[in-house]
Amino acid sequence: MDRLQAASALRGKKPYLVVVLIQAIYAGMFMLSKVAFDLGMNNFVFVFYRQAMATVFLAPFAFYFQRKNAPPLTLVTFFKVFMLSLFGITGSLDVCGVALTYTSATLAAATANCLPVITFFLALLLRMESLELRTVQGVAKLVGLGLCLGGAAILAFYSGPHFTLWPSYYKIHPTYQFHISSGKIWIKGCFLMLTSNTLWAIWLVFQGIIMKSYESKLLLTTLQCFLSTIQSLIIAIPLARDPHDWKLGWNVRLISVAYCGVVVTGLTYYLQAWVIEKRDAVFLAMSTPLSLVITVFFSAIILNDVITLSSILGGILLAGGLYGVLWGKSKEKILPDNCSNSMPDP
């Protein structure tokens, strides 16, 4: 009986463990992508290579495991998947790549924390999520969203006192230093990051809807990667005309493409689909602040980025916001509607 209880408890914790793994993988993506871009790799070519590598990685598994029981793919479903790939994957990654060239890995992870707010409002509009302010759970979710947004704003727009862990001559690359830019470039980078997150939120929400009519997570992920490869190639050809931009050597470019293609696009997309199926899109989005904390920590250790007061304060707010939202959602799963913990009328 004890073993059964332990196994049951572990199954209940699996979604939490998986989202932590997902955000750790995304933190590595932010840092490796920034390194590749700083060393001269074209961001549009980068997206094409990572999607192509993900397709090559996933296709054999999809064929082997799903060749006999693949669900029928109607023309309507294919069109939905194509548009979802175009906006939610290709568009989001291309826009994020441009924004990352203007900013830093830390900022990319910071502005990504707007994703829970965007996803939550999209889910509200589609009536996939509810927000009952007359209950403790509803207030906890609202406060958690506010803390997440406030923490991201502090990290993005406030610096404060700062320090580094290692002397400056230990830096891997001289461009890896924390700074808050000003003027049009900074505004453009922030706007593009928010646009990318909006497209990503659309992907999170609508993928859950499409999975109801096309239930194979592996085939859906592979198909999206394949379509995104074609889409990103069409976009990259006119925007990267220098043949040097398309060359991959045994260097950081190849490592970053392989990591983002196999680990991020190949593995993480499948894990995200699994989490969306087991819980929902908002649950997945609420784990986003973890990637910021991980990115700040390892950027300081590996890339010798500057640690600022804003990173500490923002990290605390994000952790508190994440706990508040997840606590509210977990209580809503347990308690019935109109239970005794409803807040009294004012």
Image: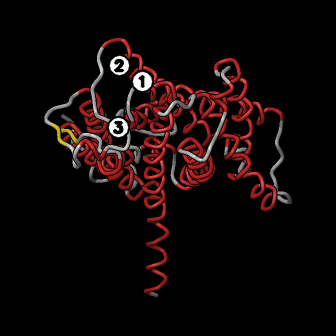
| Tag 3: amino acid | Thr
Question: Which residue does the image show at 37% across and 56% down from the upper left?
Answer: 335
| Tag 2: amino acid | Trp
Q: Find out whether the residues at labels 3 and 1 contact each other: C-beta distance under 8 Å.
A: no
Q: Is residue 69 visible?
A: yes
Q: Nearer the viewer, residue 272 or 213?
A: 272
**Extreme-bottom residue of the structure:** 1
Relative to 162, 336 lies left or right = right
Q: Which residue is mark 3?
A: 106
Q: Which residue is mark 1?
A: 102
SS at mark 2? Answer: helix
**Extreme-left residue of the structure:** 161
Quarter of the view holding residue 117: top left
Vertical side of 69 occupied by 153: above or below: above
Q: Find out whether the residues at labels 2 and 1 contact each other: C-beta distance under 8 Å.
A: yes
Question: Residue 16 at x, y = what percent?
Answer: 43, 59
Question: Residue 32 at x, y = what percent?
Answer: 47, 43
Relative to 189, 293 lies left or right = left
Relative to 52, 111 lies left or right = left
- Please rate how many residues cluster around mark 1, counting C-alpha atoms within 10 Å: few if below 14, some from 14 to 19, many from 20: many
- Which corner quadrant holds the C terminus? top left
| Tag 1: amino acid | Tyr
